[in-house]
Image: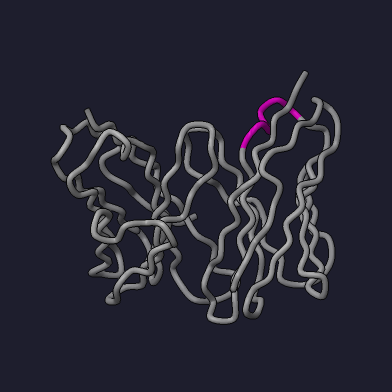
Amino acid sequence: GAVVSQHPSRVICKSGTSVKIECRSLDFQATTMFWYRQFPKKSLMLMATSNEGSKATYEQGVEKDKFLINHASLTLSTLTVTSAHPEDSSFYICSARGGLGGDTEAFFGQGTRLTVV
Amino acid sequence: GQNIDQPTEMTATEGAIVQINCTYQTSGFNGLFWYQQHAGEAPTFLSYNVLDGLEEKGRFSSFLSRSKGYSYLLLKELQMKDSASYLCAVVDSNYQLIWGAGTKLIIKP
């Protein structure tokens, strides 16, 4: 299957700083990318959907000024957590779809564990 | 609006069978996916249905009824390693992927 690479896998940052997480589709062009957040023992929570070259669509309750998403190319999307606080500590996962067909599955990155201290 | 419903959590016994349901109300339909996610890992693809009926893949089967807006994932001969979250996702008329919140499956010995 297709490969989605997410980097970094773990990051620890100080409160008030910003952290950027990258999501790359390595062997296909990702027309759509999704960003998720997951708290311990909870299901994935979709944060936003982005299509290449356009603004991300954020889910209700997700602060777009805090979680900046950029999908500038067909192989790269970034999530920047701005002015991070300890409550932003979580597992963040991206996924990417390579086309718009009904059977186009989404492939997931390995996830990034963010700890804000 | 668009909505995908699945139970939040289910418990089953090792060796038994469990059915995880997913109902959806979306603007159009172009297929339904099931994914499995183990704790701390990324989800992995299990199945895709676009036509009505049952698709079987080993111990896992997925069923779809488009007229009822309903799908289920059937897991047979449950093993402890099947403890995971199971995500249902529907492709709508714009070919956008709409995700359910997932069902956490707990397997007990």
Residue B83, quarter of the rendered image = top right
Tell me if B66 is positioned left or right of A17 in this view: right
Task: Look at the image and tell me in which quarter the C terminus of chain B lies.
Answer: top right
Q: Position of residue A33 (x, y in %)?
A: 39, 63
Residue at 50% across / 46% down in the picture?
A44
Q: Given the current orientation, which residue lies at the most extreme front position?
A: A61
Question: What is the total number of numbered labels drawn onto the structure image?
Answer: 0
Residue B76, quarter of the rendered image = top right
Residue B20 appears in the rendering:
yes
Q: Given the current orientation, which residue lies at the most extreme top position?
A: B109
Residue at 39% across / 61% down in the picture?
A48
Task: Look at the image and tell me in which quarter the N terminus of chain B lies.
Answer: bottom right
Q: Nearer the viewer, residue B23 or B73?
A: B23
Q: Position of residue B89 (x, y in %)?
A: 61, 60
Question: Is B9 inside the magenta-drawn segment?
Answer: no
Tell me if B2 is positioned left or right of B75 in this view: left
Q: Nearer the viewer, residue B82 or A17?
A: A17
Question: Is B83 inside the magenta-drawn segment?
Answer: yes
Residue B108, quarter of the rendered image = top right
Q: Position of residue B48 (x, y in %)?
A: 67, 62
Residue at 68% across / 57% down in the picture?
B5
Magenta-tinted stretch: B79-84
Residue A29 appears in the rendering:
no
Which color scheme did the rendering employ for the protein? one colour
Q: Position of residue A70 (x, y in %)?
A: 25, 64
Residue at 40% across / 47% down in the picture?
A93
